[in-house]
Amino acid sequence: MVEKLHASGAQVITCGRGERPADLPTAVAWVHADLTRQEGGAALHKTASESFGRLDILVNNAGVQVEKKVTESTDQDWDLVMEINAKAVFLCCREFIPLMAASGGGAIINIGSISGNVSDPGMALYNASKAFVHGLTRSIAVDHGAEGIRCNAICPGWIQTEMLEAGFDVARNPDAAKKDALARHALGRFGTPQDVANVALWLSSDDSAYLTGQTFVVDGGLTAASPLQPRLF
C-alpha cells in the first residue's frame, strides 16, 4: 500500500516498531513508533504536521494474529491482539481525525478482515478484533462525515503473507488444508498484497467520494460460495 500510494503521487509516512525496511522508497518518511501507545500516534502526527501541514489519507494496517480458541487464550494473548488490532486503530483515528478535519476532510481506510464477518476456527481473538474494526469504521463514518471525512474498511481474505502461512501451519495437514482452501476460491488463487493495495488506492481517491461506512471484501470469492461447493462440483 505504501508503494502504491507513493507511486500514485501521494507523500507517504509509514511506521513500525523495528528498523526502517531496506526496500522502502527513499522518499517515504519512516517513524519508529508503537501504535498501541498514544505516544506512537503523536510521533506520527508531529511528523505529518511538520512535513506536510495536512493529512488527506490515513491507513490503519498494523495487525497480528494468535491461533487459539477462547479457552486456550491467555490474558497476554488478549493484550497482544486487542492492543494492536483494535486499540491502535482507535488511537490513530482519535489522533488524526482533528488534523484531517482541519485539512477539509479526507479518507480513513481501516484494514479489517473477512474474519470480522465470518469466524476462522481457532482464532477467537483475531476474529473479535476485526469485528471491532468494522464497527469502529461505521461509527467514524457516521460521526465525522459532516467534517468531510470518509471512513471505510477493507476486509481481505486469504492474502499471501506470513499470517496466511502461520494459519496453515496449525492445521493437522497443512498441504491438504492449503489445497482445500484454494478449491474454495472462485478465482482459484490466494490474494496478493497488490490486490489489497489497489482497493486502498481507490478508497483514498475521488473515485470513491460517495462511499463511507462500508466494508469491502477482497477475498477472490471465498465467502461468496457455499461451503459445500468444492466437494459437489
Image (spheres, grey):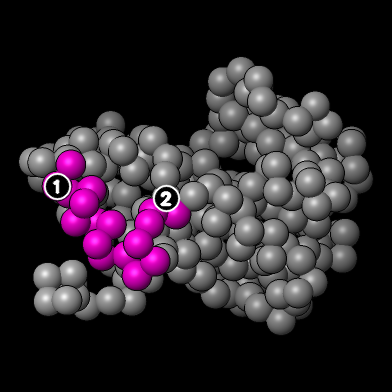
Instruction: Residue under label 1, please give it.
Output: 176
Decide whether residue 189 is among the magenta residues: yes
Residue 5, position in %: x, y? 74, 49
Please say if 205 is above or below 50.
below
Q: Residue at 87% across / 65% down in the picture?
A: 104
175 to the left or right of 158:
left
Amino acid, disc 1: Ala
Residue 178, position in %: x, y? 23, 48
Residue 189: image tag: none
Amino acid, disc 2: Ile
Q: Residue at 18% across / 42% down in the picture?
A: 175
Decide whether residue 22 is among the magenta residues: no
Which numbered disc, 2 or 1, marks the residue closer to the eye? 1
Write down the region rendered in magenta. 175-191
Q: Which quadrant holds residue 219? A: bottom left
Q: Residue at 61% across / 62% down in the picture?
A: 199
Instruction: Please state the total of marks drawn on the protein image.
Output: 2
89 to the left or right of 5:
left
Q: Secondary structure at mark 2?
A: loop
Asked if disc 2 and disc 1 are in contact, CB closer than 8 Å, the reply is: no
Task: Report how far apart the C-alphas of labels 2 and 1 lie in the structure.
Answer: 18 Å
Instruction: Residue under label 2, please give it.
Output: 159
Q: Secondary structure at mark 1?
A: helix
